[in-house]
């Protein structure tokens, strides 16, 4: 069901059995897979491909331009895998071309709890859990089944291995300080 108070760009592609709540905005170039739920007050910007059975909760901003100073407005993308849950207030930025891969990619079956941030050009594997306020700066790679405690932070250009656990309130440092 699409609420009459939602704003859906005519170029957006909505799958079967989609729900979009009131005051949500689905912008141009957004593709949403079947059986996905977009709650109220969500902003989805494209180009972005949202998988099947995805749930996005209120006040999330998904697919926004990156705030990186090198971003020059070029068209970049965002991909979110099937069955991923994006909770309240989450922010996810698309990639950038200058120094990036031009895409931000989040795998399948992930859980991004309230106020998580995923920066530009991040590649997040499948079955990743990020607790409240965990944050990935740009250019971070995360392996499958990684787990981030609340308020943990990962600076740019880090790789987090599969099955890693980042403790709450932690900052990931380089393996060697210079």
Image: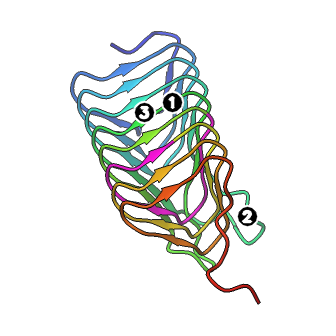
Tell me the tag on residue 87. 1
Is 132 rendered above or below residue 18? below
Q: Is residue 126 magenta?
A: yes
Tell me the tag on residue 68. 2
- In x, y percent, where is residue 106? 41, 54
- Which image quarter is the N terminus in? top left
| Mark in the foreground, 3 or 2 | 2
Q: Residue at x 68, y 48 (%)?
A: 169
Is 91 rendered above or below residue 53? below
Residues at marks 3 and 2, CA–CA distance in whole angstroms: 29 Å
Q: Earlier in the sequence, mark 2 or mark 1?
A: 2
Q: Earlier in the sequence, mark 3 or mark 2?
A: 3
Where does the magenta region start and end?
115-130
| Mark in the foreground, 3 or 1 | 1
**Label 1 near label 2: C-beta < 8 Å?**
no
Secondary structure under the numbered disc 1 in the rendered image: loop
Is 63 in front, or is 90?
Answer: 90
Q: Is residue 85 left or right of residue 51?
A: right
Q: Is residue 26 magenta?
A: no
Q: Residue at x 25, y 32 (%)?
A: 15
Mark 3 lies on residue: 10
């Amino acid at each position: 069901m699409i609420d009459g108070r939602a704003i859906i760009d005519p170029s957006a592609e909505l799958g079967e059995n989609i729900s979009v709540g009131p005051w949500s905005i689905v912008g141009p170039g957004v593709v949403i897979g079947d059986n996905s739920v977009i709650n109220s007050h969500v902003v989805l910007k494209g180009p972005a491909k949202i998988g099947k059975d995805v749930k996005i909760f209120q006040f999330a901003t998904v697919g926004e331009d990156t705030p990186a100073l090198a971003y020059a407005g070029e068209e970049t993308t965002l991909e979110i895998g099937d069955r991923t849950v994006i909770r309240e207030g989450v922010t996810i930025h698309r990639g950038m071309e200058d120094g990036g891969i031009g895409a931000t990619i989040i795998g399948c079956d992930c859980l991004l709890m309230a106020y998580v941030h995923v920066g530009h050009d991040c590649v997040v594997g499948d079955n990743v859990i990020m607790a409240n306020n965990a944050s990935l700066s740009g250019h971070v790679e995360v392996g499958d089944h990684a787990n981030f405690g609340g308020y943990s932070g990962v600076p740019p250009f880090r790789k987090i291995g599969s099955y890693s656990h980042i403790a709450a309130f932690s900052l990931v440092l380089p393996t060697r300080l210079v």
